[in-house]
Image (tube, helix red, strand yellow):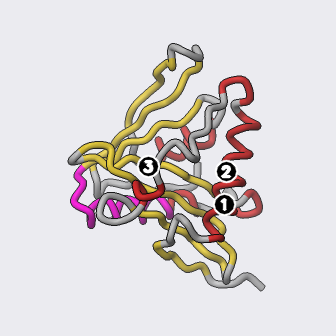
Amino acid sequence: MTNALTVRHLDITSAEVSEVLDILDAEYRTRYREFYKDDITAYPVTDFTSPDGAFIGILEGDVLVAAGAIRRYDSTTAEVKRMWTRDTHRRRGLAQQVLRELDAAAGDLGYTRIFLTTGSRQPEAVALYRASGFEGGERRIPEFDLPIFAFEKPVGRTTLTERP
């Protein structure tokens, strides 16, 4: 029997979130070995708390199964960071649900646009963002010669589509 899913704003310093960030960091290290730089600790945790940010989690029972955060990018733009779905819960539309919740949180915080980047070694993330109404394309990181994708969209326009 599957527990009901609940959406919650979470404290980024909590133990359940710390576990998720450790898993996400390990995934980044695996995907981007030679290019890896510690993105998880690159920003202060206060960036992901009110009044400029938020951390959203989807829980199945007491287990955090998907999450994402926003932080201030500039005065009108929120940046999505920390997108993650537990590997046992992928392909269920949870990441798109997290994006919709982050979109709503961005609107609540007064942002009018959402921006994000993802690496070329995460094609499933690129597909997710495109399917969710984000527009953008490939850029290069000169110091690594590694392509990344930068996307943005207006707040309030997260597309409801089938899973990518």
From the top left corner, tell me how far across and down residue 69 is, in percent. 47, 57
The magenta segment: 98-112
> What residue does disc 3 label?
80
Q: Nearer the viewer, residue 162 or 95?
A: 95
Relative depth, front residue between 5 and 17: 17
Q: In this view of the protein, which residue sits in the foreground, 112 or 130? A: 112
Residue indicated by mark 1: 20
N-terminal-most mark, 3 or 1: 1
Q: Amino acid at mark 2?
A: Leu
Q: What's the distance in space between the residues labelled 2 and 1, CA to CA? A: 6 Å
Residue 24: mark: 2
Q: Could you tell me residue 136's position as x and y percent?
A: 39, 31
- Helix, strand or loop: magenta stretch: helix
* Disc 2 element: helix
Q: Report if the CB atoms under discs 2 and 1 are less than 8 Å apart.
A: yes
> Which of labels 3 and 1 is toward the front?
1
Whether 20 is drawn above or below 30: the answer is: below
Residue 29 drawn above or below residue 47: above
Kind of residue at disc 1:
Val
Q: Residue at x 69, y 84 (%)?
A: 3
Per the image, label 1 sits on a secondary structure element best described as helix
Q: In the shown orientation, is residue 155 left or right of residue 149? A: left
Q: Is residue 105 magenta?
A: yes
Q: CA distance from mark 3 to mark 1?
A: 16 Å
- Which of the two discs, 2 and 3, labels the residue nearer the N terminus? 2
Q: Residues within 10 Å of mark 2 (few under 14, many from 20)?
A: some
Q: Label 3: state its secondary structure.
A: strand
Image location of residue 50, percent across then percent down = 34, 66
What residue is drawn where x is 32% and y is 50%? Answer: 72
